[in-house]
Image (spheres, rainbow, N blue to C red):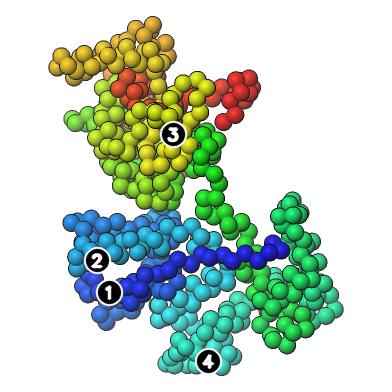
């Protein structure tokens, strides 16, 4: 870009976190306990480090998007979660002296974790991250001894390098010796022609012909000129003599290309910059499909924790595939039905969603139900949402945005801090009639509602066979499945959850039949569905004919 952009990615690290503090820590699996560990965060907020007596420092990249911390156990425990992705996670528990200290460190860590800009820093800033890790770990790779000697730094195995001597410029020179950017060197030689350096005119040509996106508006993003090129040389060329002459060396060219000025994304758009007062249907929504699965779609493992992690990354729409629980407690479950995946309890997922829904973002969270439950357990779904979410659940339309034809949907700003249920909904007159009928049964002390509604009360209702409501037909050994089918299911069943071989998985995929969500909706669940309703997509032609643009 012709105008330099100052990318302020760094968030201030609280002084008490830089100074550090002594806490006990433990891991659960396998159980490890260390007392009186010294914890601190570096000045850039890159790493949380800790050291116990007589041991080398440990480094945890917990201050990244995958990180999470939350306090529990009477407010004295901080749970710190980290990992390379949302599935491969490790948990460490820090025991503080009191609840106020735990809250102070929890708030401080969260402020650093929830920094989307830090995930888009330039390569030069990443090098600063590496030098921070180097000093924190106290370890030196053997391959850098000769490079240290070439830079005039202590290079013996028993020598120590003072932090004051080993500046970032020294570290940068070291990285260039160990891992030279030959690709940039080739480009530089091509641009400089027969000269040893790039002049202002050559740099202007490169910036306009190679770097600048020709699709950009010429007024908002003007072309580079000699003045801009000269300013770039002044900022990035390390040789003062060359700077005065308006020349750029290969080193200066490399520093420029590795800076924030050459980011592949618009750095001023990493956080919310759009107007958020338009109707909800005017926006793309950051969504997750089959959220509960941590890996395989067949024979995979379902998890409650993955809902927490997904919401902490900023996702605003998660999917819950709800099926009837078959245990003694008849608790609804979430799983990938008929695909031999493990289950998690619906109520546990709802609790996890409540804990993390609005820690990263205030914008509304949509729970997309793929509802395969019978009416009795659908009522449980609705009650769990009411009881656990409380005021967070949007049960009725907002007064200013009635669900009527011609009325716009509320905006993301209008729905801040609210959880919406997305599910099929009964027609208004059918819902009203069935809800009145249900309440009469409840008042009379009859907890259940008849599921045998007539077709004129619910035109969309389908008579679904009992087997279709089974999340795990492979576990049924009754008369509903023939013996031959049982043997086939047994052959396809993985030896352990999540450990199918290739042949098993291919056979399972071929035999898999998708079962659509039920249209036989409990009126109580239907009554808490607002603004977000599941609608079957027919075709683009039909959508265009009805002027549906979303």
Is 332 placed left or right of 264 in the picture?
left
Tell me the residue that label 1 is attached to.
Answer: 21
For marks 2 and 4, give the CA distance: 41 Å
* Mark in front: 1 vs 2: 2
Pointer 1 and pointer 2: residues touching (CB < 8 Å)?
A: yes
Q: Which structural element holds mark 4? A: loop
* Residue found 26% across the figure and 57% down from its top: 71
Q: CA distance from mark 3 to mark 2?
A: 52 Å
Q: Which quarter of the rendering shows the C terminus?
A: top right
**What is the secondary structure assignment of the residue under circle 3?**
helix
Picture quadrant where residue 541 is located: top right
Q: Marks 3 and 4: CB-CB under 8 Å?
A: no
Nearest-to-viewer mark from 2 and 4: 2
Q: Earlier in the sequence, mark 1 or mark 3?
A: 1
Q: Residue at x 48, y 37 (%)?
A: 411
Q: In which quadrant is the N terminus drawn?
A: bottom right
Query: Along the polypeptide, which appears first: circle 1 or circle 2?
Result: 1
Q: CA distance from mark 4 to mark 1?
A: 33 Å
Which mark, residue 508? 3
Secondary structure of residue under mark 1: strand
Q: Is residue 450 visible?
A: yes
Q: Position of residue 65 (x, y in %)?
A: 44, 57
Asked if residue 405 is positioned above or below residue 24 in the image, the reply reads: above
Q: Do the residues under discs 4 and 1 have CB atoms within 8 angstroms? A: no
Mark 3 Cα shell of 10 Å, populated few (<14), some (14-19), many (≥20): many
């Amino acid at each position: 870009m012709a105008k330099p952009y100052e990318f302020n990615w760094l968030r201030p690290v609280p002084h008490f976190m830089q100074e550090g503090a002594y806490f006990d820590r433990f891991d659960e699996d396998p159980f490890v306990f260390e007392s009186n560990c010294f914890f601190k965060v570096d000045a850039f907020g890159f790493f949380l480090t800790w050291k116990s007596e007589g041991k080398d420092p440990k480094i945890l990249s917990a201050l990244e998007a995958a990180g999470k911390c939350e306090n529990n156990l009477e407010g004295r425990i901080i749970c710190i979660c980290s990992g390379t992705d949302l599935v491969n996670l490790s948990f460490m528990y820090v025991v503080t002296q009191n609840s106020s200290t735990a809250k102070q460190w929890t708030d401080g860590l969260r402020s650093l974790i929830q920094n989307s800009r830090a995930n888009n820093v330039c390569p030069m800033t990443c090098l600063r991250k590496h030098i921070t890790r180097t000093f924190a770990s106290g370890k030196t790779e053997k391959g850098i001894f000769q490079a240290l000697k070439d830079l005039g730094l202590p290079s013996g195995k028993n020598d120590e390098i003072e932090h004051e001597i080993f500046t970032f410029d020294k570290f940068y020179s070291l990285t260039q010796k160990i891992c030279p950017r030959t690709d940039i060197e080739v480009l530089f030689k091509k641009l400089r022609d027969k000269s040893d350096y790039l002049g202002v005119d050559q740099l202007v040509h490169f910036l306009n012909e190679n770097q600048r996106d020709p699709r950009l508006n010429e007024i908002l993003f003007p072309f580079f000129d000699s003045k801009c090129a000269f300013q770039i040389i002044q900022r990035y060329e390390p040789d003062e003599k060359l700077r005065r002459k308006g020349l750029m060396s290969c080193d200066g060219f490399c520093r420029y290309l590795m800076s924030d000025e050459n980011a592949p994304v618009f750095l001023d758009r990493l956080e919310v910059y759009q107007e958020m007062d338009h109707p909800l249907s005017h926006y793309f929504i950051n969504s997750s499909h089959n959220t509960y699965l941590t890996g395989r779609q067949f024979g995979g493992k379902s998890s409650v924790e993955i809902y927490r992690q997904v919401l902490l990354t900023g996702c605003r729409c998660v999917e819950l595939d709800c099926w009837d629980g078959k245990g003694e407690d008849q608790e609804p479950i979430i799983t990938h039905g008929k695909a031999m995946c493990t289950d998690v309890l619906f109520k546990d997922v709802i609790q996890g969603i409540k804990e993390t829904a609005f820690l990263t973002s205030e914008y509304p969270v949509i729970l997309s139900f793929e509802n395969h439950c019978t009416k009795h357990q659908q009522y449980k779904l609705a009650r769990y949402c009411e009881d656990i979410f409380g005021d967070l659940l949007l049960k009725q339309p907002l007064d200013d945005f009635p669900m009527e034809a011609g009325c716009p949907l509320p905006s993301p700003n209008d729905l801040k801090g609210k959880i919406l249920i997305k599910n099929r909904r009964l027609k208004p007159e059918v819902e009203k009639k069935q809800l009145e009928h249900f309440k009469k049964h409840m008042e009379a002390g009859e907890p259940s509602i008849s599921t045998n509604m007539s077709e004129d009360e619910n035109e969309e209702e389908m008579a679904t066979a009992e087997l279709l409501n089974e999340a795990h037909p492979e576990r049924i050994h009754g008369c509903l499945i023939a013996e031959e089918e049982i043997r086939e299911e047994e052959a396809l069943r993985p030896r352990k959850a999540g450990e199918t071989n290739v042949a098993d998985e291919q056979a399972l995929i071929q035999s898999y039949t998708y079962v659509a969500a039920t249209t036989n909706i409990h009126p109580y669940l239907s009554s808490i569905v607002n603004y977000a309703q599941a609608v079957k997509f027919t075709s683009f032609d039909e959508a265009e004919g009805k002027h549906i643009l979303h």
